[in-house]
Amino acid sequence: MRIHSLLAFLLAAGACAPAAARAQTQADSLLRPGSAQVDGRVIPEGVESLMMYVDPGNRRMDASITLRTRLATVDGTEAIVRTETFWQGDEVVQVDSFVLHRETLAPLSRWSAGPQGLVRVEFVPGMARTARAGEWGRDSAEVPLPQPVFLAGTTDMLLGALPLREGYSARLAVYNVDEGVTSIDISVVGQEQVALPSGGRAAAWEVEVREAGPPVTYWVDRESHTLVQYASEGGVIRFVREPPGPQRRRETR
């Protein structure tokens, strides 16, 4: 889920193919697609809605994210197709869509449309091919990927596919279209019963994630392996899962 890149925009707007890799044997080794620790088969289909809250005052803002996950066969490959629609009120702010290998979560393609224009990325063996179009014009690039990497911005799915437990930590190799090959560090802080706006609670793993910038926190449902809650540094901005009522089951685009 690509929350980080949209937070500044939302606030300013008034919302204030898989390649095998050897199994990892050391705690500080980079996890890559093909690692025995990653099992994308536990990721379920479904539609989730997350509402935005801002402190102080735990104010609910008129911004939300719809996460639509489905299983499909793409060009003969069993895959997970995720579409993420970012809303401000009833207006679509950005849409991200990506296709991952069903088991390993190796990226196959990504498509994004938002304030900065249109981005398309195709992953072929050993390379990522990117095409951009926006107000500045069009450009393209080919970036060598000599080793398998995950796709940046798929963190909630990566966490859902990992064997989270007390004391678990890992570093994952990821590819970011803007930054190239980098890594993210994850560490399970503990377990928590997350209070939901609906009045219920969800048993979740609390996971600290360090990407570019300050650490953020994800809460991953222990049963469904889906995202329950996300919080920026200090919990100033949170996205919390809500029941998919009629007003939130809007079609993603």
Image: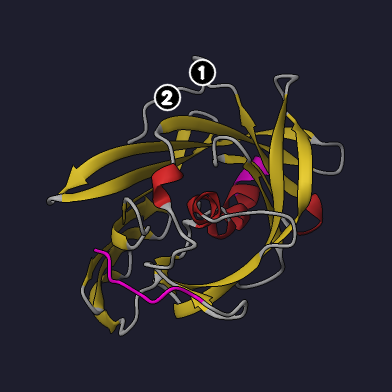
Q: In this view, does 157 lie above or below 182?
A: above
Q: Position of residue 159 (x, y in %)?
A: 55, 54
Name the residue located 52 percent from the left edge and 57 percent from the top edge. Answer: 155
Per the image, label 1 sits on a secondary structure element best described as: loop
Per the image, label 2 sits on a secondary structure element best described as: loop
Indicate the quadrant where residue 202 lies. Answer: top right
Q: Which amino acid does label 1 sit on?
A: Gln
Indicate the quadrant where residue 5 lies. Answer: bottom right
- Packing grade of label 1 (10 A; few <14, some 14-19, many >=20) is few
User: Real-space Cα distance between discs 1 and 2?
Assistant: 7 Å
Q: Name the residue under label 1.
A: 247
Name the one closer to the observer, 42 or 175: 42
Name the one closer to the observer, 38 or 186: 38
Name the residue located 55 percent from the left edge and 80 percent from the top edge. Answer: 29
Does any portion of residue 46 appear in the rendered image?
Answer: yes
Name the one closer to the observer, 183 or 102: 102
Span of residues in magenta: 13-24
Q: Which residue lies furthest to the right in this view?
A: 57
Q: What residue type is labelled 2?
A: Arg
Number of the label disc, if any, that sits on residue 250: 2
Number of the label disc, if any, that sits on residue 221: none
Query: For the C terminus, which image quadrant?
Result: top left
- Viewed as shown, does residue 248 lie left or right of 123? right
